[in-house]
Image (cartoon, grey):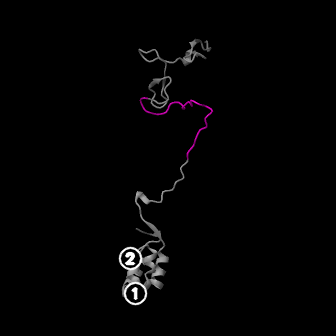
Amino acid sequence: MDTENRSNGPSPDGMHPVSSTESMPSAPGTGRPTKFCKFCAKTVDFDAVLCIHCGMQIEELKSANPSQPNIVITNQNNNQNYGGMYLGRQKDKWVAFFLCFFLGYLGAHRFYEGKILTGILYLFTVGLFGIGILVDLIIILCKPNPYFVR
């Protein structure tokens, strides 16, 4: 048997001969060479980079300017908004608790949370006559650590 490949003439690029085992089928009616998609096995244009049938990338993209470097962008941006919601300023539970316990009559824990008006109210009413301090101590102990203030 003859295992030698016979040449069918030049390839579309005109550089290398196409052997009979590598012959490219042409698109019906156009005479243009085609190739097979390696993902869906359908015929596509020989110069195609993406398959028009399945959308997969068949060939590597050819750079128009080979001297231009490849640019790789790695985004290391960490988003602090949880689930796309703005949760406010992060505060420590124990700082707020000890401020309320020792300086609650001055409203220090309210000022720490950024609640200026209620801080002034606690300042002039001695922690809402002590009842506000007691309620705030219980509320602060029930909060997770850290908690968020809007």
Q: Characterize the local packing of mark 2: few (<14), some (14-19) or many (20 or more) Cα atoms within 10 angstroms.
A: few
Residue type pointed to by label 1? Val
Residue at the spot of label 2: 117
Q: Residue at x 45, y 67 (%)?
A: 89
Quadrant of the image occupied by residue 126: bottom left
Instruction: Name the element at disc 2.
Output: helix
User: Of the residues shown, which amino acid type is indicated by label 2?
Assistant: Leu
> Is residue 8 shown above or below 71?
above
Identify the magenta region.
52-73
Circle 1 residue: 126
- Report x, y in % for residue 6: 59, 12
Residue 133 belongs to the span the image colors magenta? no
Q: Residues within 10 Å of mark 1 (few under 14, many from 20)?
A: some
| Residue 36: image location, x then y, percent | 48, 25
Q: Is residue 40 above or below residue 109?
A: above
Separation of marks 1 and 2 at Cα, in angstroms: 14 Å
Q: Earlier in the sequence, mark 1 or mark 2?
A: 2
Residue 135: x %, y % from top left: 37, 82
Q: Indicate the quadrant containing the C terminus: top left, top right, bottom left or bottom right.
A: bottom left
